[in-house]
Amino acid sequence: ERGLFSTQARYGLSFVKNDKSPQEMPDGMVEFDANIEHGPFPKSALARGAIAPKLAFFHAELAKTDNVKPIFELTKDVSP
């Protein structure tokens, strides 16, 4: 989802088992929600004291999906 000076994106990392994979490795995908602010002076970067011009400022968090539900239960619904 693209805005004027920011973009919201979701990235996925898929796990594929093969004969060399550990037996405990889960199947499925882990997803990340990303907030990308476009430069030259992204708001979040300025708020953190970074005053140098930047092409983009990127922040990502683990998305709450069924595959990582136990992790969110441990952290009381806060992204680790």
Image (cartoon, rainbow, N blue to C red):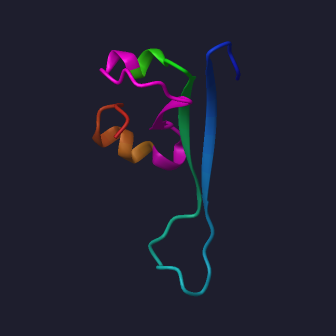
**2 relative to 58, above or below:** above
Q: Is residue 63 magenta?
A: yes
- Residue 55 highlighted magenta (yes or no): yes
Classify the position of the C terminus by image quarter: top left
**Residue bounds of the magenta highlight:** 46-68
Q: How many marks?
A: 0
Q: Position of residue 37 (x, y in %)?
A: 55, 23
Looking at this view, is 21 or 24 the one in front? 21
Quarter of the picture containing the N terminus is: top right
Q: State left or right for residue 43 relative to residue 36.
A: left
- Residue 44, image x, y percentages: 42, 19
| Residue displayed at 48% across by 79% down | 23
Q: As rendered, which of 46 and 67 lies closer to the eye? A: 46
Residue 15, x across and y down, in percent: 59, 64
- Residue farthest toward the front in the current orientation of the protein: 52
Estimate the x, y position of residue 26 in percent, counting from the top left.
51, 65
Left or right: where 20 falls relative to 47: right
In the displayed structure, would residue 29 be above or below residue 27? above
Q: Residue at x 63, y 24 (%)?
A: 7
Which residue corresponds to the image point at 37% horizontal and 39% vertical from the top-left? 72
Q: Residue at x 54, y 29 (%)?
A: 56
Rendered image quadrant of residue 4: top right
Q: Nearer the viewer, residue 49 or 13?
A: 49
The extreme bottom residue here reads: 19
